[in-house]
Image (spheres, rainbow, N blue to C red):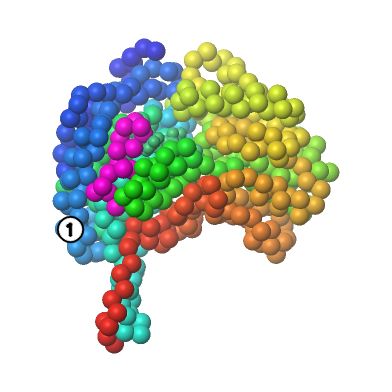
């Protein structure tokens, strides 16, 4: 790998080599750094400071010191500062989109249209909730008060870097909590811009703190920290389980947004000409690197050939390439480790005897550098195959055939995960009935628009707790009953 310092979006070394703690950019206690690699060309585009447990201690102390003041700040004042953060995200949207494209290979059009605006939506929702949320209710002489839980440790992944950050930070600080954020060490650049933005928005020192570094060092120190009250992690099941174990001795609240293997049932009366292309594009959105991507398309057996042809035609039209090109739909996979995992899963699908409809192993033709992965569709997939059971987290779709709707539901539920699910069908009553039988935290009927108020989270091994909207906000609250309150 070579160092590429001439990139027009170079990150300010003043901030990248520092952490944001107690309202200031500070150097790590033990000097160390981590390279950030642009997945489009495999060059190192920045070095970020690599934290240790000592940096976590400093950040937690700052958050603890700020908690009493921030949690007692009137909700309307908190809403005002959060409104400033929202306005600054919109003002700096191009800078944020460029950082996302650089750190994880997001196609620039996708970063502009999805990654940044959806991230801003979580902030707007948190701001708006503050004008109506009932922090105190009184019934039968007892008051129920909802109060900020305390200092929160927030650990985020690389696939939707800014979006995952705002989905945690915005409701946490809206609730009156103070936070320590550890973004993914693989895609930490948009987080640095976010920290500066939060500062410029006028958030008081110590309310938001950022420490970069690895999960094993910084993340583990946060999970075990005796002065952190709650940890919210989005990431792999492996990391989620390790966080829960490390957090157990101090009896923290732990919320986990983990993996998924979401089904997409095409009922016999679905509009296949529409449903198949939409299903393929949903599965491959963000290069398939979404926890709730509907990567198992479950279709009537007698329509299998038609579905395969529609899927192949859809893939044919997808432009994979340089994320900086306006025409690009899918950029590269976000990092080398993930590229290798996806390649191994494509090989596993071939080994297991699934039928390759399009795509396959290796890089996209014309690229000898960059983690460009061929959008791949397998058909005749059996539910027990590894490619149908394990999260691939890349542009790989499994088509599984069913004979009856009951069998389709059984296949949909034949997974340790339960994050997202989709159902397509013209008969809305039937689609609703199928939705009620699926064990997952979100079910989408006929590809509706994204709703930032809809709670998001997992059944089964996809996690514990919810994000977004009122339910996501309430994760950051404690409940106090005052009995004998009166009235
Ligand atoms: P990852 O588990 O490798 O890392 C996620 C975060 O956890 C990173 O910040 C990492 O440094 C940290 N971490 C790793 N080990 C840790 C430890 N022992 N203690 C504390 N922190 C630790 O995941 P990833 O590869 O960055 O992200 C992809 C995964 O995230 C996929 O499984 C995906 O499904 C999941 N994800 C879930 C959701 C959701 O909302 N359910 C959303 C996005 C991604």
Could you say which is closer to the camera, residue 122 or residue 61? 61
Q: Residues within 10 Å of mark 1 (few under 14, many from 20)?
A: some
> Residue 64 placed where, x, y %?
19, 50
Dot 1: what SS?
helix
Q: Is residue 85 visible?
A: no
Residue at 28%, 64% in the rendered image: 147
Vertical placement of residue 384 versus 409, above or below? above
Q: Is residue 3 visible?
A: yes
Residue 342 lies in the magenta-colored region: no
Residue 220 lies in the magenta-colored region: yes
Mark 1 highlights which residue? 68
> Residue 485 placed where, x, y %?
26, 82
Q: Which range of residues does the magenta coloring cover?
A: 214-229
The quadrant in which the N terminus is found is: top left
Vertical placement of residue 429 versus 486, above or below? above
Vertical placement of residue 132 versus 166, above or below? below
Vertical placement of residue 193 versus 346, above or below? below
Where residue 199 sits, quadrant-wise, is top left
Could you say which is closer to the camera, residue 405 or residue 313? 405
> Residue 77 placed where, x, y %?
21, 61
Q: Is residue 352 left or right of residue 53?
A: right
Numbered label tally: 1
The quadrant in which the C terminus is found is: bottom left
Could you say which is closer to the camera, residue 387 or residue 327? 387
Residue at 34%, 53% in the rendered image: 251
Q: Please state the quadrant of the image where ligand 1 appears.
A: top left
């Amino acid at each position: 790998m070579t160092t590429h310092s001439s990139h027009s979006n170079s990150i300010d070394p003043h901030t990248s080599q520092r952490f944001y703690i107690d309202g200031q950019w500070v150097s790590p206690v033990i000097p160390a750094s981590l390279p950030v690699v642009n997945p489009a060309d495999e060059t190192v585009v920045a070095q970020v400071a690599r934290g240790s447990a000592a940096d976590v201690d400093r950040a937690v102390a700052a958050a603890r010191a700020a908690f009493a003041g921030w949690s007692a700040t009137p909700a309307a004042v908190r809403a005002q500062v959060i409104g400033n953060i929202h306005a600054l995200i919109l003002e700096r949207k191009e800078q944020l989109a460029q950082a996302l494209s650089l750190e994880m290979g997001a196609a620039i059009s996708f970063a502009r249209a999805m990654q940044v605006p959806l991230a801003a939506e979580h902030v707007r929702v948190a701001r708006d909730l503050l004008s109506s949320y009932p922090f105190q209710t009184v019934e039968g002489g007892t008051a129920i008060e909802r109060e900020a839980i305390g200092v929160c440790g927030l650990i985020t992944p690389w696939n939707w870097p800014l979006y995952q950050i705002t989905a945690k930070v915005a409701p946490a600080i809206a609730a009156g909590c103070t936070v320590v954020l550890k973004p993914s060490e693989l895609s930490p650049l948009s987080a640095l811009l976010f920290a500066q933005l939060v500062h410029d928005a006028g958030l008081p020192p110590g309310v938001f703190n950022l420490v970069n570094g690895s999960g094993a060092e910084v993340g583990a120190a946060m999970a075990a920290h005796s002065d952190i009250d709650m940890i919210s992690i989005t990431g792999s099941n492996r990391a989620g389980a390790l966080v829960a174990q490390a957090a157990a001795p101090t009896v923290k609240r732990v919320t986990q947004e983990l993996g998924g293997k979401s089904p997409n049932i095409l009922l016999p009366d679905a509009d296949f000409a529409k449903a198949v292309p939409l299903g393929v594009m949903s599965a491959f959105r963000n290069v398939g690197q979404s926890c709730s991507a509907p990567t198992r398309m479950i279709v009537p057996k007698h329509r299998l050939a038609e579905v395969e042809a529609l899927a192949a035609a859809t893939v044919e039209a997808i432009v994979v390439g340089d994320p900086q090109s306006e025409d690009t739909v899918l950029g590269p996979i976000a990092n080398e480790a993930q590229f290798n995992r996806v390649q191994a899963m494509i090989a596993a699908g071939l080994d297991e005897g699934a039928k390759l409809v399009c795509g396959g192993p290796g890089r996209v033709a014309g690229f000898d550098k960059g983690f460009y992965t061929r959008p791949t569709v397998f058909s005749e997939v059996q539910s027990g195959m590894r490619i149908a059971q394990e999260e691939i987290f890349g542009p790989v779709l499994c088509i599984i055939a069913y004979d009856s709707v009951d069998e389709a539901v059984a296949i949909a539920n034949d997974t340790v995960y339960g994050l997202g699910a989709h159902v397509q069908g013209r008969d809305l009553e039937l689609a609703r009935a199928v939705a009620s039988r699926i064990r997952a935290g979100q079910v989408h009927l006929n590809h509706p628009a994204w709703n930032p108020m809809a709670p998001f989270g997992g059944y089964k091994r996809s996690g514990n707790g919810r994000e977004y909207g009122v339910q996501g906000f309430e994760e950051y609250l404690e409940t106090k009953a005052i009995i004998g309150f009166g009235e």
